[in-house]
Amino acid sequence: MISSSMALSSPVSLFQLCMLLFSFFFSTSFSAKLNPTIDSLSLSFPLTSLPLSTAKPLNRNPNLRTLSSSSSYNIKSSFKYSMALVVTLPIGTPPQHQQMVLDTGSQLSWIQCHNKTPPTASFDPSLSSSFYILPCTHPLCKPRVPDFTLPTTCDQNRLCHYSYFYADGTYAEGNLVREKLTFSPSQTTPPLILGCATESSDARGILGMNLGRLSFPSQAKVTKFSYCVPTRQAANDNNLPTGSFYLGNNPNSARFRYVSMLTFPQSQRMPNLDPLAYTVPMQGIRIGGKKLNIPPSVFRPNAGGSGQTMVDSGSEFTFLVDAAYDAVREEVIRVVGPRVKKGYVYGGVADMCFDGSVMEIGRLIGDVAFEFEKGVEIVVPKERVLADVGGGVHCLGIGRSERLGAASNIIGNFHQQNLWVEFDLANRRIGFGVADCSRS
């Protein structure tokens, strides 16, 4: 997931460090385990972006009850957008509304369970009749399970303990639990494996949406979801632009254009590949109408997995491998070189930044387009190619992957504004549709 969604001061993607740590700690990885038989779910949730705070340890409640059964459900709502997509979901029985960053780049979903005083928005297990902590004897608590950035362990209370670390230094650890989402008395998800964070460096949870077996779509049997990110604007937490998020069929999908996802078998192990990410067949980049001289192979995984191109709602910026980034930077310097802010690198990853007139620089750069197969493309108009990073500085919104310690191309949410992005898991494809997301 995003480090910019988790830590709004940084544009780093959370799933990337997960990918690197997977490679370091484990020799295997899980491929998606999706159930294509259920696609009638249609949901949308309120999202917002709020200040961060540090979580405190939880005082565990020993009075835990077993899970109740799930039933069918069908719900719709909306979300708000800042640098991150933070969905508010009804967790437990009766439901407690929890804020979770919508992240297509990570797997495990987790909520805050720090039980702070005075009361906060963190989840209180003692109030839910469907809450259950996994014991050490559970299969997920066995050593070397490759669904976590560190091996799960057995804590002093014989409960299953997990640890997650992300690219910007954000971390969360606590117990693995089973809990359901309760949208109404008759509309609940099945019991889901979640993390119940007793300590974390962030005040929000994560809604893991990738292809992993423990992701929300896999566990909840969701085979299609989509979101529409509205354009950014100067706003405070009480006046954020509103977009839409669906779980299930999207009424706008007839006008979407689709590209097939690249999938990788479990046996195909490559050190730099994330087989659980939403990998797309990107073919090129245009700037100001000019097709850059970048071989299409730069955007595809090589024998070691480097060059993979993925769509990540959890990453704020887009990141490119060196061959692509250098070509983009060369063209930007050619058209606006004297205006580049010398010696400035935003977030340690983005160095195409400016402190001049946004409209003038955008006009000089022109539209930026990401090209895929079958003529499908994402076009970012010149009016929105620059991201406001504070202090009067604006950056192109593209960073160098190498500075993350990653070897992947990542399309972040900044370049998904005013665009429907649909993840059709049953048909293994991703759809794009231009829209006014503030009205969709």
Image (cartoon, rainbow, N blue to C red):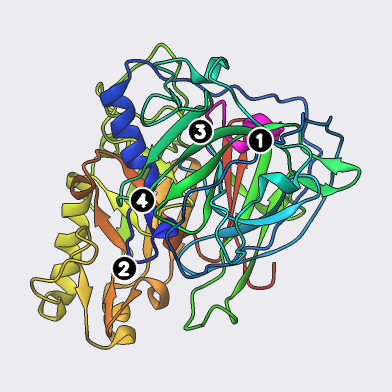
Q: Classify mark 2: residues with Cα within 10 Å, few (<14), some (14-19) or many (20+).
A: some
Q: Report the residue marked by disc 4.
A: 170
Q: Report the residue marked by disc 1.
A: 62
Three-letter code, disc 1: Pro
Is the magenta region chiefly helix, strand or loop?
loop
Asked whether, in this view, residue 138 is left or right of residue 333, the answer is: right
Closer mark to the observer between disc 1 and disc 2:
1
Closer mark to the observer between disc 1 and disc 4:
1
Does the segment drawn in magenta span residue 219?
yes
Three-letter code, disc 4: Thr
Asked whether, in this view, residue 149 is left or right of residue 49, the answer is: left
- Residue 24, image x and y in percent? 26, 25
Does the segment drawn in magenta span residue 40?
no
Q: Report the residue marked by disc 2.
A: 288
Q: Residue furthest top?
A: 267
Three-letter code, disc 3: Met
Closer mark to the observer between disc 1 and disc 3:
1
User: In whole angstroms, how far apart are the C-alphas of marks 1 and 3?
Assistant: 44 Å
Quadrant for the C terminus in the image: bottom right
Mark 4–mark 3 CB contact (< 8 Å): no
Mark 1–mark 2 CB contact (< 8 Å): no
User: In whole angstroms, how far apart are the C-alphas of marks 2 and 4?
Assistant: 36 Å
